């Protein structure tokens, strides 16, 4: 496999990542020279540092003696390694991100289609390591979120989040701003900042693929949702959405209303189900409503996701998808009230890692929260 000649730096913040980081670094080294890979060991208490040192030169490793967190670690590395001065592009990834073979070439090709410094960031497509009903749900969710929603947002100039595991930044952006550390979702916060400061276009590249490890139990899945959704509402407040006068404001408001509607729909559906016990006519209405949702939304989108990911496995869990979609809507609404009441969740431990014994063979792969 030919290594890229593009001036791109790969940057990782790692804390207690011994289960995943070796695979990540091995995959990266096939694509770029070791001298262009930088890692911050954020006070790991396991074998993470030893694994990093086996893979990289000491001059490419920063060691935090006291835990700083992902955001501060990334910012420290960008400044101390002078990455924005040395490279044209900077690719911060998570310690479990496996980059697809053509990811970097596809991203750089997208940058070069436009005049220099007119593109702030290029985002790739995320796939999930599919090992259970939750990760199958993420296969479905990522496909809809990227291939349909993010692709459309890219066309209208309103991408709402530069995914933390699949975004390459032009170095001029990280000369102007660093990752904000006042919300739970630093990647979304930085995305909103790029829009507000008009630092350039954010473009989605569908052929640039990474592969991600997602939660494999409902407890960790829920914690991740609370982090993501609380961070979303924090960013809405921080960046004065929807009063900023940009297309971003319209898009974020639309997503917010859709999420809230989903949450309240669940409450209304539960109410109707209770009433239907005593009212047969209401029971028929509820059944018809559920049937239309399955026929119009769930089945077509699941077929689309299955085709795009070349898998039939996700049909096995279509019933789970239906319930999880509304569960996510409830969590989204719950997080709105948390933020309204001033209950923040800036402190966050990254998603629990797990060892995958045999990962499906893929040409495109990568992620983290």
Image: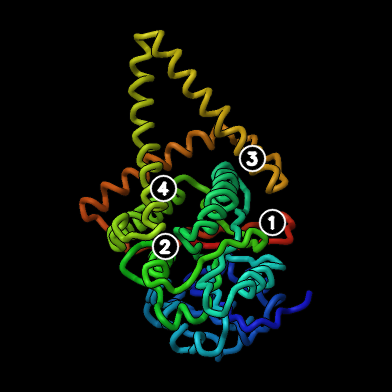
Above or below, 162 against 116 in this view is above
Which residue bears the numbered disc 4? 255
Residues marked 1 and 3 touching at CB (< 8 Å): no
Asked if the residue under mark 4 is in contact with the one under mark 1, i.e. CB atoms within 8 Å, the reply is no
Disc 2 on helix, strand or loop?
A: helix
**Picture coordinates of residue 75, whole percent (x, y):** 42, 79
In the drawing, does residue 152 fall left or right of residue 188? Answer: right
Q: Kindly report the distance in space between the C-alpha atoms of the residues bearing marks 1 and 3.
A: 16 Å
User: Tag 3 or tag 4, which sits nearer the N-term?
Assistant: 4
The residue tagged 2 is: 188
* Disc on res. 276: none
Marked residue nearer the N-terminal end (3 or 2): 2
Residue at left offset 67%, top offset 57% = 357
Mark 4 and mark 3: Cα distance apart in space: 25 Å
Residue 167 percent across, percent down from the top left = 54, 67
> In front: mark 1 or mark 3?
3
């Amino acid at each position: 496999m030919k290594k890229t000649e593009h001036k791109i730096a790969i940057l990782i913040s790692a804390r207690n990542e011994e289960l995943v980081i070796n695979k990540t670094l091995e995959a990266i080294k096939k694509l770029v020279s070791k001298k262009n890979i930088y890692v911050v060991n954020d006070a790991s208490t396991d074998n993470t540092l030893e694994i990093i040192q086996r893979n990289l030169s000491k001059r490419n490793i920063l060691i935090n003696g006291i835990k700083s967190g992902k955001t501060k670690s990334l910012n420290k590395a960008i400044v101390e390694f002078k990455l924005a001065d040395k490279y044209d592009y900077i690719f911060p990834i998570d310690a479990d991100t496996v980059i697809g073979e053509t990811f970097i070439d596809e991203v750089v090709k997208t940058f070069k289609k436009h005049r220099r410094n007119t593109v702030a960031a290029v985002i790739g497509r995320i796939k999930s390591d599919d090992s259970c009903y939750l990760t199958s749900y993420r296969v479905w969710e990522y496909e809809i979120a990227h291939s349909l929603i993010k692709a459309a947002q890219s066309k209208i100039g309103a991408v709402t989040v530069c995914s933390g595991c699949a975004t390459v930044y032009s170095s001029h952006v990280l000369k102007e701003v660093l990752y904000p550390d006042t919300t739970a979702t630093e990647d979304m916060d930085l995305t909103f900042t790029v829009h507000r400061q008009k630092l350039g276009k954010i473009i989605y590249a569908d052929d640039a693929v990474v592969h991600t490890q997602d939660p494999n139990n409902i407890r960790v899945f829920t914690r991740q949702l609370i982090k993501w959704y609380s961070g979303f509402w924090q960013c809405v407040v921080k960046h004065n959405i929807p009063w900023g006068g940009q297309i971003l404001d319209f898009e974020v408001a639309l997503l917010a209303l859709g999420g809230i509607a989903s949450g309240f729909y669940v409450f209304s559906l539960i109410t109707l189900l209770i009433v239907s016990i005593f009212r047969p006519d209401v029971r028929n209405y509820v059944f018809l409503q559920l049937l239309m949702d399955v026929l119009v939304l769930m089945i077509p989108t699941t077929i689309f996701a299955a085709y795009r990911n070349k898998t039939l496995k996700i049909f096995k869990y279509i019933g789970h998808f239906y319930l999880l979609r509304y569960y996510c809507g409830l969590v989204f609404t719950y997080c709105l009230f948390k933020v309204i009441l001033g209950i923040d969740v800036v402190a966050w431990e990254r998603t629990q890692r797990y060892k995958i014994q045999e990962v499906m063979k893929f040409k495109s792969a990568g992620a983290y929260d």
